[in-house]
Amino acid sequence: EVQLVESGGGVAQPGGSLRLSCAASGFTFTNHWMSWVRQAPGKGLEWVAQIKQDGSQKNYVDSLRGRFTISRDNAKNSVYLQMNSLRVEDTAVYYCARGGPGTWTDWGQGTLLTVSS
Amino acid sequence: QSALTQPASMSGSPGQSITISCTGTTSDFGIYNYVSWYQQHPDKAPKLIIYGVNNRPSGVSNRFSGSKSGDTASLTISGLQAEDEADYYCSSYTSSVTYVFGPGTKVTVL
């Protein structure tokens, strides 16, 4: 059974940094692109970033490029999202998703990030 | 503002069929066939129900079907059931190697 478990969310201050983690299991991690998708409270889905199987290609939504960095550790079956210069509008549930390009077959339960002073 | 447009809400009675549209506002949408649809129940993670315009993942009911014509993709739910009440999002690839979701359509089963 595919499992994606996000962690690292919580409360952060504007201007601060946080790193989200996603632990994957139940499939061959190195065979799959991985992505992050977020959802602000009461709002729709927003694709954030994706990373290729070997980490050689990373793509970001234009509005976040430069502040957010996606990475992965294939030895730990994990994908990460480093978020810097956080803003109130980054408040959202962040989902880790398996797949790409553009087809996210499995999703984690999400981790909530609240950016507030 | 999303590059994809969807109706904010749709409704139907049990057993009826409804079709949700997803229209691309850029020329890219008409070129690529990386259109997917996701179902999301309240406080749950999204679930993939259609990919590559008209492909259903294993385990997804055949009551869900997808299509695309020009700048508009569509998701049809046939034989509407109470469990279909959810938000539905389309997504598409864009030419700048990024992806965009539509604003979502809330489906109510009357």
Image (cartoon, rainbow, N blue to C red):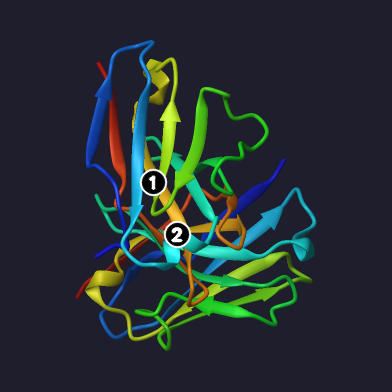
Q: How many marks?
A: 2
Q: Tell me: residue B3, above or below residue A5.
A: below
Q: Name the residue that disc number 1 marks.
A: B89
In this rendering, would A74 be left or right of A39? right
Q: Chain of mark 1?
A: B
Residue B30 got which mark? Answer: 2
Q: Tell me: residue A3, above or below residue A48.
A: above
Quadrant of the snapshot with the N terminus of chain A: top right
Name, please, the residue furthest toward the left: A117
Across and down, in percent, residue B99 comes to 46, 65
Query: Measuring 80% from the left and 56% from the top, which residue is drawn there?
Result: A28
Quadrant of the snapshot with the C terminus of chain A: bottom left
Residue A56 at least partly seen:
yes
Do the residues indicated by labels 1 and 2 lie within the same chain of the protein? yes
Q: Nearer the viewer, residue A41 or B31?
A: B31
- Give the residue type at disc 1: Tyr
Residues under numbered marks 1 and 2 in contact, where contact means CB atoms less than 8 Å apart: no
Q: CA distance from mark 1 to mark 2?
A: 18 Å
Q: Quadrant of residue B84?
A: top left
Query: Measuring 24% from the left and 42% from the top, which residue is drawn there?
Result: B7
Across and down, in percent, residue A92 comes to 33, 61
Q: Nearer the viewer, residue B40 or A101?
A: A101
Residue at disc 2, secondary structure: helix
Residue B42 at least partly seen:
no
